[in-house]
Image (spheres, rainbow, N blue to C red):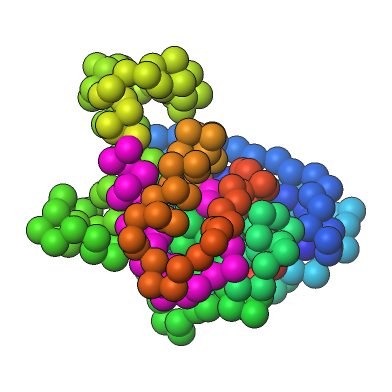
Amino acid sequence: MKIGIDLGGSHIAVGLTESNGNILSKKEVQILKEDEKNITDIIENYICTSVAEITEFNNVEEIGIAIPGTIGTSKVVKSVNLGLEDYDIVKELNKKINLPIKIKNDAKCAAIAENTYGSLKQYSNSVFLTLGTGIGGAVFFNNKLLSPDEVPGFEFGHMVIKQNGRLCKCGKRGCFEQYGSMRVFKERIIEELQLDPKIDGEELLKIVERKKNNTAIIDIIDEYTTDLSVGISNLINIFEPHAIGIGGSFVYFDHIFLPLLKDKLLNGNLLFNKREDIIINTATLGNDAGMIGATLI
Ligand SMILES: [Zn+2]
C-alpha cells in the first residue's frame, strides 16, 4: 500500500491507496488564509500526524506528494499557490517519517492517474490538459510520461498563440493560458452578465445553460472554443496523440464546449495531418486524480 498526498493551494488531502489505485481511506484539512505565514509548519505537522496514524495499522511502502508549481525531484523550486520557494520538503518530512517520499507537480500527477486508471487508460500515446485557473499539461508516449530533467516542462499554458496578446502572469504576452483557461472564460461571462465575481462554478454553469441563446454568450463560447482549438491543434500537430484528455473545471462544461471544439479542430484548417475523428475524453477521477497519481510517480 502507498500513501498519496494532494497538497493543493487551499487543502491538504492524505489517502491510503492499494496497488490498483483504489483509495482505502482519505482525510483532508483546509489551509486557511491565516495559515500562510507558517505554511511549512502546517504542512509538515498535518502530513506527519496523518502518516503516523495510517502507518500504525497499515504496511505502507512509500509516500507520493502532488504539489502545484515548479517541483524538482526533492524540492519545491517555486509554488506561487502555496507561497513556497526553494523548500526542501522531502528532507524536512524525512526527519520524522522513515519512508521513501517522492514529489511531483500536481497536474502531472493527475495526468499520470488519468493515463493509468482514468480517461486515457486505453491509449498509449496521449496528451492531457488541465483547464482550470491556468493550463497544465502532460504528454505520454508509449505510456511513459515525457519529462525533462530539471524542470517539469510541457508548459502548454505558456505557448504563445497570439503575438503581442494579453499579458500573462509569467511576464510574456499572448500565452495560451490567457485565452484557453477556464478562469478567462468565467471572467468573460461574469463581465458580460455583470455577475458577482465570487459566483461558484456550479451556479455559473446553470446561468450559461439558461442563456445559451443569448448572442453575447454564444460569441464568448465561440471565441473561447476557437482559441482553445488553436492551442490544442498545435499540440496535436507536434505529438499526434491517439487521444486527448481534459481535466479541471472544463469537465463540468464539456457538453457545451466539446462538440464545438471538435468541429473547429476537424474543420478549422488547423491540423497538418487530416483526421477523420478526434478523441477527446474528459477526466474521470475528479478531485482524487492528484492523490492517486502521487502514488504512481
Ligand atoms: Zn505565460
- Residue 285 against residue 77 in the figure, above or below: above
Magenta segment boundaries in residue numbering:
222-247
Residue 69 placement, left or right of 5: left
Residue at the bottom extreme of this rendering: 149
Instruction: State which quarter of the image contains the N terminus.
Output: bottom right
Residue for point 58% across, 63% down: 243
Residue for point 59% across, 47% down: 282
Relative depth, front residue between 5 and 46: 5
Relative depth, front residue between 9 and 222: 222
Relative depth, front residue between 74 and 219: 219
Relative depth, front residue between 272 and 219: 272
Position in image of residue 223 (x %, y %):
28, 41
Q: Is residue 155 visible?
A: no
Count every numbered label the image shows and give the total.
0
The answer to whether residue 245 is magenta is yes
- Residue 250 against residue 245 in the figure, above or below: above
Position in image of residue 260 (x %, y %):
43, 42
Residue for point 45% across, 82% down: 148
Position in image of residue 286 (x %, y %):
63, 43
Residue 29 placement, left or right of 183: right
Position in image of residue 42 (x %, y %):
52, 47
Instruction: State which quarter of the image contains the C terminus.
Output: bottom right
The answer to whether residue 80 is magenta is no
Residue for point 80% across, 69% down: 61
Among the 4 quarters of the image, the one containing residue 117: bottom right
Q: Most prominent secondary structure in the magenta stretch? A: helix
Residue 221 placement, left or right of 90: left
Q: Is residue 168 visible?
A: yes
Among the 4 quarters of the image, the one containing residue 93: bottom right
